[in-house]
Image (cartoon, helix red, strand yellow):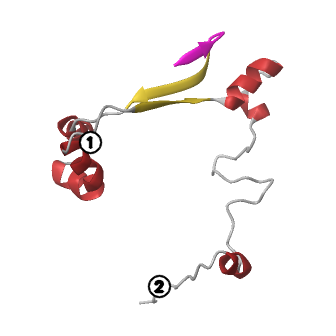
Amino acid sequence: DVVCNGYEIASGSVRNHIPETMVKAFEITGLGQAEVEARFGGLYRAFQYGAPPHGGMAAGLERMVMLLTGTPTVRDVALFPMNQQAADLLMGAPSDVTPKQLRELSIRVVAPEKK
């Protein structure tokens, strides 16, 4: 983590890359090995072939702007503010896709059959 004046402005981690550790971590959440293999089989098998240790870090641009502007809360500088339901009230998102938008992207939607 990168911290400035007591505020975390970037965080990261090294990903787990050991299959046995992956299964143990999921067991803590209540998933057994069979369910881990069924739901995350691709990742699980990749780890069995020896995926190298890997990780990453992401900087919090909004937190940096908050500190630079002296704003008391990150919500005041959020680029895309959302409410508690993860909806963007300014842009009206998420919203239904129009038929025109689907045509522009050559996407066809087939509605499920009603039972």
Helix, strand or loop under label 2: loop
Near-viewer residue (30 or 101): 101
In the picture provided, is 19 more to the left or to the right than 61?
A: left
Graded by Cα atoms within 10 Å as few (under 14), some (14 to 19) or many (20 or more), the crowding at tag 1 reads some
Residue located beneath label 2 in the image: 112
Near-viewer residue (28 or 106): 106
Segment tinted magenta in the rendering: 1-6
Q: Say whether disc 2 or disc 1 marks the residue closer to the N-terminus.
A: 1
The picture places residue 44, in percent across and down from the top left corner, at 24, 48
Q: Quadrant of residue 55?
A: top left
The picture places residue 42, in percent across and down from the top left corner, at 28, 54
In the picture provided, is 2 more to the left or to the right than 96?
A: left
Q: Quadrant of residue 13?
A: top left
The picture places residue 99, in percent across and down from the top left corner, at 70, 81
In the picture provided, is 100 more to the left or to the right than 115?
A: right
Q: Is residue 64 above or below residue 95?
A: above
Q: Quadrant of residue 28?
A: top left
Graded by Cα atoms within 10 Å as few (under 14), some (14 to 19) or many (20 or more), the crowding at tag 2 reads few
For image coordinates 74% across by 37% down, the residue present is 78
The picture places residue 26, in percent across and down from the top left corner, at 26, 42
For image coordinates 58% across by 24% down, the residue present is 10
Q: Amino acid at mark 1?
A: Phe
Q: Amino acid at mark 2?
A: Pro
Residue located beneath label 1 in the image: 26
Near-viewer residue (47 or 32): 47
How far apart marks 2 and 1 lie (CA) works out to 33 Å
For image coordinates 81% across by 53% down, the residue present is 90
